[in-house]
Image (tube, helix red, strand yellow):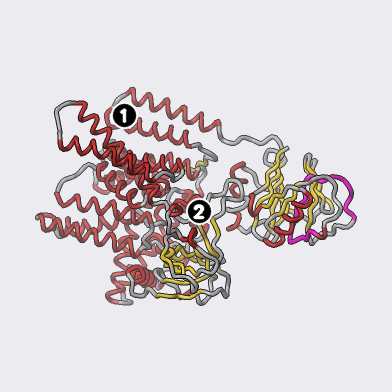
Amino acid sequence: MPAVVGFGLGVFVADAMGYTGSAAWWYVAMACFLPVILSVLFPGPERWKAVGASAFILLLFFTLGGWRNNATYLPEQADFFASQLEAEDLLAVTINSLRPGRKSIRAETTVKALLNDSTSNRSVTGQLLLYLPPDEKTSTLSVGDEIVFKGEIRELKKPLNPHVFDLRAYWHRQAIYHQVFLREGADWRVSQSARGGLRARAERWRNAWFQTFQAYLSGDELAVAAALVMGKRDGISQEVKSAYTETGAIHVLAVSGLHVGIIFLILRFLLVTVLRLDRTTAGRWLVAGLSVVAVWLFALVSGFSPSVQRSAIMFTILAIGGISHRKGDIFNTLAAAALLMLWLDPGQLFRVGFQLSFTAIIGIVLFASPIDRLIRWPTKLLRAAWSTIAASTGAQLGTLPLSLYNFGQFPTYFLVSGTAVIVSAFGAMFLGLFHGLVVALGGESAVASLTGALLGAVIGLQNAFIFFFQQLPGSLIKVPELSWYWALSLAIGIGLLAIWVRWRNWWTLLAGIVVFVGTFFGARAQVPGEVKGATLTLYHVSRGGLMDIRLGGETAFALGSEPAPDDLAWTAGPNREHYGYEPAFTLPFTADTIVGDLALSNGILTAGDTRWLILDKNLPTEGVPSGDFTHLLVRNGYRPDRLPEVSGTPLLVVDGSNPTYRLAEWRGLGERLNWEIHATGEDGALILEW
């Protein structure tokens, strides 16, 4: 355990230092390695030798973590594709995953080579996001295909609107830094089909498995069953996703450790409990081998997501440990799994999925057994249900600080909803596997109809249960903002509680209570209170425009066009939720209105101490009254040569309704007139307070 902590700290420090000095990390690591070797070759009874050797071992893992983090940082590699790319290059990429969307199909790809007729082809490294039009040509693509194309490589943009999810940071942690958009009719072709590759075969198996569901399930039942059993999440509606999120059950819709664990348990039950193959050393090797093969096969068929890979590695170590027929220390097993994963990809340390996977298991290990012993139930069924509740409670306690910090919410009825979902997921996984096997072996039959109907009934009951708990009053506690230090304080309090549960040290319990109380009041103090002044927020909306004007408290209205519900999460939605308001109405920029001390008339907006001239090609600009304007808002491709006579030095604001070439024209005008310019597509939302 100390080794993985040291390695993780090294990764964290190297990341904070900015991925520089790989050689220095390596030299320090080698310098620490020498005393470790000497302590092994020349052991002694002296205490200082043991302490010194332990210190050098920790320092060795710390420096190895820093070196490994920098050594695997792709943009610093000499063969990183973005630094080698020339204007005439074609990119050859391999598709790792395909995800359909409303407007495009997103492919996560690995860049293999840069192709150029005038220069030699170059092998390169790196990944990028490729967005393709959802046409007939794209529908023929499969995971593992290699395609060649030419397109404009763009760096991922920072969040442009307040409080939205930082998608750039998310993809950076997946080692993806660039994206390409190919429009309909763009020139690209498949250079090598992966029909015979392992990933392509697994994708075809998954599609065939999915087709066995389609004959017996439909609607939300089909979507949830496909997500739960095989990790196919394309069909889940926003309504279903929200319900599972708000009840703390969203983890069952993403194939992860729970699903791999169920596969592992089912197989162990058949091989160990039923067939009793673990009685001999050869049998234990057979059980371990079959378990590992089954886990990795399921990981491949279910999409081979990072969460599944983490779980497969963890259960592989557990299976190999079972060969010795001894119960090892679970923390050593977790540490070995974490160390292996971080060595392969140090960036996983910063991924929420990695953090939640391990904290959930740690919570189960620390709390499940003590909670399970609190009540002795008379029947096996009640004991099994209580054990599931204990495991669910332990997982929630382990992940609570991370959940509040990253997602800002806590499901109130998790004890019941979480337990029910785990039981339901076990049944759905078993039925989904069995149903696929029945159809594969016997085709459409009475048995297949029965297994399909049972699977549909289990999923339907699970969905009804989730929606019921979502509708209960107080089903979700929202924490608008929790700083990292209060999340750490909460984790310390939970750690003290775990110590008390195990050793019944009352001073530890008292310290834990003090920490919990301090965390509660400290976190509560940083929750955004009622804004007494007024706020104007001009959001970036692609091909549109939206302005929220909040006049204090919950009184607010909007100007522009309200985005579609799916787009609201990337524009105004998070900011409105953060401050707890909804606009009473939305008016176009061409409207005339007076609200309090705010007035909009003939394209002139007066708000507080600001005076805006709205330059919209749909609005006339003749006869604009003279006077100073603090802001000029350019909309819908308004041309600079139509600019009326304006006095003063206003801030030139160009929103997302303008094409790129028009923004360039306004930049040129701004430079000539010495006006500052704010482009929402580059600088993000404009926020004013008064």
Q: Residue 500's spot in the image, x, y percent? A: 31, 29
Q: Which mark is residue 35?
A: none
Quarter of the view holding residue 231 = bottom left
The residue under label 1 is 500
Question: As rendered, which of 367 and 528 lies closer to the eye?
Answer: 528
Quarter of the view holding residue 499 = top left
Residue drawn at the location 19% of the way across and 26% of the way down = 47
Decide: marks 1, 2 in contact (CB < 8 A)? no
Answer whether residue 221 is visible to the viewer in this image. Answer: no
Q: Residue 618's spot in the image, x, y percent? A: 79, 61
Element type at marker 2? helix
Residue drawn at the location 80% of the way across and 45% of the way down = 649
- The range drawn in magenta is 623-640
Residue drawn at the location 42% of the way across and 51% of the way down = 73
Main SS class of the magenta portion in the image: loop
Q: Which mark is residue 242?
A: 2
* First in residue order: circle 1 vs circle 2: 2
Answer whether residue 109 is visible to the viewer in this image. Answer: yes
Residue drawn at the location 51% of the way across and 33% of the way down = 523
Element type at marker 1? helix
Amino acid at dot 1: Trp
Amino acid at dot 2: Ser
Q: Is residue 24 magenta?
A: no
Q: Which residue is most to the top?
A: 507
